Structures are given as structure tokens and as C-alpha cells.
Image (cartoon, rainbow, N blue to C red):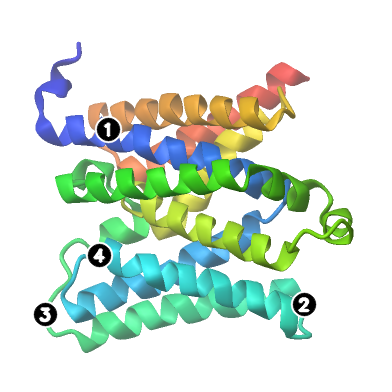
Amino acid sequence: MFEFLQYEFMQRAFIAAVLVSVACGAVGTYVVIKRIVSLSGAISHAAFGGVGLGYFLGVNPVLAAIPFSILAAISMGAVREKVKISQDTAIGILWSVGMALGILFINLKSGFAPDLFSYLFGSIITVSNSDLYIMLILDIIILLIVLLFRNEFIGVSFDEEFSQVVGLHTTFINMLLLALIALSIVVLIKVVGVILLIALLAIPAAIAKQYTYNIRKLMILSTILGVILTTLGLVLSFIFNLSSGATIVLVMAAAFLLSYYIQD
């Protein structure tokens, strides 16, 4: 029944499922509570510019996506703070510019990008050992920052105006949260791809939020749900020979609908 576990690529895929779920649980909680899912989507699409830059420079696209995604996230935060345009307009600009830069970088690089499709739509079974190490390091960084700034993140998520009144540097905390979202996106990018990863960041936390408002419990439940649903999607994609990224997202969407049905 579990003979697929004998394959090394499946073993790596299951480890990746756990690692991405940690990022989803820690950061996705604040994304859902603060209602910045669309903003996270813009950062995820902008991250494709980093993937393209990696191809152009001949380095690991995941590594190149780290500074590029953080820069895009901070730029998005600066635009929201300084420029007098609506948030949805700023999101649309960042979204399209990031994708356009990625395509441009890839066009400038001679030759064919063989695994480009996996960065767009995800392919958890192609995750390499080096990808797993990068995911692990980013998870550790994410968890450390979440623990160190736990109270500050809670403050800006639930009542940003009051947090500012009591002396919290809300601009810095918001920027830091956006940077964490960018790091989480890099963790997720090889699993479900740029196009689909926002579901992995938001759905487990959205399901967990129906059962608890305690931040610590919400993160733990989101992580557990992420592991279960990502693993289930991975197994189904292997059995039925389907795209792993799309299958994982559809499994999560089905779980989300089922959770609402149970609640009603």
C-alpha cells in the first residue's frame, strides 16, 4: 500500500510537505487574521522575477528569489505607506511587474529553462536535497522571527491604530511581516508554484480560524492541517498521475468547503 515511499523523490516530497506546512502555519495565520491574502498573492507573483533572475545569472532560482521577494515585499509596503494610490492598484502593479521581469530575464538567457513549469505550477516530487536544506533554513528563520516579535505581530494584526498609539513601530513591524511572507513564498514555490501557492498560505489558516482564535493554537492547527492536506494531495497526485501542485490546492479547497459544511 505504501510502496511509493521506497522512492527517494517521494521521501523528499513528504519532507517538503512538512517544511512548507511549518511556514504556512506560522505566517499564514497572520495573513488570514490581517486580511492581506491579496497582498500576499502580489508578492508571490512578484517572486517569479527572482526565479527569472536566477535563470539569467545561472544560480539556483530559489536562492535568487529570496532577496528579490523580500525587496518586492518591502517595496509593496513602502508604496502602501508613502504613495497616494489605492492598495488594489499598488497590488496590481507589483503583481504584473514581477511576472514581467521574470519573463524578461528568462528571455535574455539563451537556451531552454527545463523546470520553469515547476516554478509556475509546482512540482513537489522534483524537490532536491538542496531545496530541502533551503526550506529548513528559511523555516528556522521564520519561526525565530515569529517567536521574537510575537506580541508585535499580534498587535498590528488585531488593532494597528492602538498599537501605534501605545508606541509600537507599526511601519517596521508591517515591513517585517511582509518580509516573512516573502520568505514563506520562497519555501512554497517549488511545491505548488507561483500561480497556486497563495492557497497553501491561506487555506490551512482559514480552516483553523473557524475553530480557534488563540494565535498559538491557530498556528499549530494550521501546521497540522497543512501536513495532512499536502500529504494527501501528494499521494493522490502520485496514484492518479496528476499535477502535484494543482492536486494539493484542490484537496485544500475541498477541505475548506467541508469545514464550512461541518460548521453549519
Q: What's the residue type where badge 2 is placed? A: Ser
Question: In this image, 72 relative to 135: left or right?
Answer: right
Q: Tell me the tag on residue 15.
A: 1
Q: CA distance from mark 1 to mark 4?
A: 22 Å
Nearer the viewer's eye, disc 4 or disc 2?
A: 2
Cα separation, mark 4 vs mark 2, equals 33 Å
Pick the front one: 146 or 97? 146
Neighbour tally class for label 1: few under 14, some 14-19, many 20 plus, Cα within 10 Å = some
Task: Verify CB contact (< 8 Å) between mark 3 and mark 1.
Answer: no
Q: Residue at x 25, y 73 (%)?
A: 54
Residue extending furthest toward the bottom:
108
The crowd level at tag 4 (other Cα within 10 Å; few <14, some 14-19, many 20+) is some
User: Can you tell which mark lies on residue 86?
Assistant: 2
Q: Secondary structure at mark 2?
A: loop
Task: Provide the secondary structure element on which disc 3 rests.
Answer: loop
Q: Which label number is shown at residue 116? A: 4
Tag nearer the camera, 2 or 3: 2
* Residue at the (54%, 69%) spot, across then down: 73
Give the CA separation, mark 1 to mark 2.
40 Å
User: Which residue type carries mark 4?
Assistant: Leu
The numbered disc on residue 111 is 3
Type of amino acid at the residue the image marks with label 3? Gly
First along the sequence among labels 4 and 2:
2
Which one is earlier in the sequence, the residue at label 1 or at label 4? 1
Q: Are marks 1 and 4 in contact (CB under 8 Å)?
A: no
